[in-house]
Image (cartoon, helix red, strand yellow):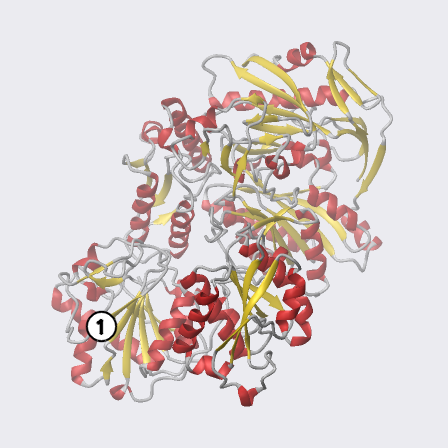
Amino acid sequence: MAKIKVVHYINQFFAQIGGEEKADYPAELRVGEIIGPGTAFESAFGDEAEIVATIVCGDSYFNENIDKAKADILEMVKSQKPDLFIAGPAFNAGRYGVACGTITDAVLNELGIPALTGMYEENPGVDMFASKLYIVSTKNSAAGMRAAVKKMAPLALKLARHEKIGASVVEGYIPTGVRVNFFEKERGAKRAVDMLLKKLSDKPFVTEYPMPDFDRVAPNPAVKDMAHAKIALVTSGGIVPKGNPDHIESSSASHYGEYCLDGVEALSSETYETAHGGYDPVYANDDPNRVLPVDVLRQLEKEGVIGKLHDKYYSTVGNGTAVASAKAFAAEYAQKLLEDHVDAVILTST
Amino acid sequence: MLVIITNNPLIQESFGSTYTVDYEALSYDDILIKIRDAVHRGASILTHPLYGSVKPKETPYRSVLMEMREGPVDMDSLLLIEQTIASAGKFPNKSAGYDEATLNDCKIIDLSLLQGALRSM
Amino acid sequence: MVKEIERAGIPVVHVCTVTPISMTVGANRIVPAIAIPHPLGNPNLDHEEEFKLRRKLVEKALKALETEVDGQTVFEG
Amino acid sequence: MKLELGKIYIKDIKFDDCQRIEDGVLYVSKEELTKIALSDDHLASAEFDIAKPGESVRITPVKDVIEPRVKVEGSGGVFPGWIAKVDTVGSGKTYALKGMAVVTAGPIVGFQEGVIDMTGPGADYTPFSKTINLVMVCKPVEGLKQHAYEKAVRLAGFRVAAAVGELARSLEPDETEVYETCTIKEGLEKYPDLPRVAYVQMLQSQGLLHDTYVYGVDAKQILPTIVSPTEVFDGAIVSGNCVSACDKNPTYVHQNNPVVEELFKQHGKTINFVCHILTNENVFLADKERSSFFTAKICKMLDLDGVIVSEEGFGNPDTDLIMNCKKITAEGIKTVIITDEYAGRDGKSQSLADAHASADAVVTAGNANEVVILPKLDKLIGTLDYINKIAGASETTLREDGTLEVEIQVITGATSEVGFGYLSAR
């Protein structure tokens, strides 16, 4: 069988070009070269796979020119027709982690090539990409390189061969939120007793099923000057332009809609409706302002009570009335609201 | 007012004289939505809608005892019905191919489970 | 959802019918709404009355945004 | 209470007119067993067969699995309230036939699940592919109602298991395990520095085909109560549960309750295993509240430091589990819970129907929605009617080549919520 062809992505530091001062190094394809951590992968692969090219890119360059860097690197990867793409590992380097996550995601989803990266669990790249990618959990510094490669290489080969991927604890990746079965070494009752003994003696223990997120975020300071504030509307009640152009699903929607309110004085049953399947839609369809109060906010805007109603609103559909879901894409539109200098948000839920 | 919302005709036959039975020939999903809408109007659920370990849609029948009210939403009932609808969504509809005898088994189990619950009232 | 907006640094008020759910999902400023299928309306009122009711609720939401809070706060009445 | 559990290892089962156990081989007579099974006039016929580990045999639909045992010393007898009269069990001496089980099979209702494969991938998921199984398939007399049929088969299983167990009465056990618990005061004096731990077992108790019995009492009619952990070894708890094959507790699992066994291993060393608390899983929501308040109160009154709570079955018991966890934790008692998951075929859905922050120590027995392909096996004991029936009606299908595509929830004991098995998920 032919060897699996691998393209490896690393930053300027691991390419031994330099540290922070060289972080603006643009993306570069080095065909036939195996650099830095690549040698460790190469020996871990044995006869199974070979690195055919290494892509080097400075972390600042990538993050500051993200669209161009991504496009350029995708072209470089494509040109090598690899069977597998590996980025990093990035350990605890934040911008490197974000770059590895971004490019691994792009190679996987845009090129359809099996792809893998690795980083420390607290790397910001984990929060952004853990639910979309296999990210091998590594130590927090390059001292953990050997251990990282030892876990990444076999998982990468499995991905390249399209084999079934086991549970996160077995394969060594950071949990993706997808539950995967496997056989433990001890039976469940023994594991429960062991866990209780740890809990009783205040030793750390790891639950096998983390409960949904119960963390709290501290409140932001109040709006000081409402008369000049830009207020945005967001709803989990699924109000969308009639016909639901973005096909927001009727429950636990997998995406959100961004809609323009420019020139909209009030919502009406002719132009808006609800996509939410979690409540009787009659009242919202009859008068969508009952869920998204555009009419009132326009009036308050005219009277000068608020400075401005933001000209975009965001809409999605929660799981029933539980608006806890949808964390990932909420973070995404929260960034957009921030970029648009929104001062405060009214979130309506059914 | 206590009402049994059900799509099991046997409930009407067995409890019709002692309880108010709101029977409608609805699907498993639709009977849950009917319960949900009642909860949204203020009704309380008294028996767990995910009763029985016969998996959702492995039986086509659901019968739930409710206290019908209009007014503020009962939080526990709301969570319960929403969790139930979410759980039911995970299961494919298996009961479509059932013959009469099997449907009858399903009706009797449904009746028995509700009977068990009503006994403890 | 509400937490992610707050996390981004933007004050947010959650207008929500079932306030305990709002507490569970971690909202800090909470304004109770009318009913699940019509949180900011009441189909039993005529159009003008209903608009007034909605305006009151939105004003209450703005008030909540103008109020400093320590932790989770429900703005009743 | 002190119980000596003598283990007699069974290496093989053979049919023979002269019933006996000799050199680890169990000889049983079909004629004798049939007579015992049919002593209830609700049953029209009973067929017996033997399935051994590694054989190409599939047993389905499985109703119950029972370990033959006999009480040789001490008060009471096995299966009190059913076979023996009601008397407190759990002390003295009991013999168990290890390495084998009595399996009752046959459809009580038309959609019953429960598959035991003795070989292949399905065998990995069920603990009963490792036991030599004496299988009994019963048929009811014409026109028998489901309630009466379930009870008749349940009791026939106990009678046969007890009769087989009786064959061991005069034998010498191959191995003996001693289990001893103390009274409250003894425990405090003997183990003043050890944390006080109990096991809270939730019993499926919702109605027809969903019932569990404690000393003959239907568990839906009990208030939470305490027993000595040794009592289950004599069959104080039995199963009347025919649905939820993967996460119900067959009688065998009650007799060999793994949480009780594992807590006993730590008893006197790292913990003081105070008692076994039984509670139920009823349909009526007020019952759920009441039972969980009682359970938490009992935990508090016993001055416990820690408990393990186990669930049984799918769906609404998640509500009981979370209520128990929340209320017991609120009493300042450290809690570990055991459950299984229904995360959907793709593993992406919310696993439990309820959640609470206090449930921070969870042991999971795996995702019951996971799909496996079971190969065609040479021999079938029971009937494939159910699986045939749903073919075409859903994705769960008897495929053209004779293989079965099923979720592991149809496999007996696949995701045991008392932690009998090794399966887990992350």
Which is nearer the eye, D294 or A340? A340
- The type of residue carrying mark 1 is Cys
Q: Position of residue D227 (x, y in %)?
A: 69, 41
Which is nearer the eye, A174 or C47? A174
Which chain hosts label 1?
Answer: A
Q: Position of residue D19 (x, y in %)?
A: 76, 14
Name the residue located 52 percent from the left edge and 69 percent from the top edge: A126
* Vertical arrangement, residue A346 with respect to residue D254, above or below: below
Which is nearer the eye, C48 or A164? A164
Q: Secondary structure at mark 1?
A: strand
Q: What residue is shown with label 1? A: A260
* The N terminus of chain D sits in image quarter: top right
Give the left or right position of residue A286, taking residue D340 as reference. Answer: left
Residue D9 appears in which quarter of the rendering? Answer: top right
* Vertical arrangement, residue D92 with respect to residue C16, above or below: above
Name the residue located 78 percent from the left edge and 26 percent from the top edge: D11
Residue D332 visible to the viewer: no
Callout 1: 10 Å neighbours few (<14), some, many (20+)? few
Residue B93 appears in which quarter of the rendering? Answer: top left
Residue B64 appears in which quarter of the rendering? Answer: top left
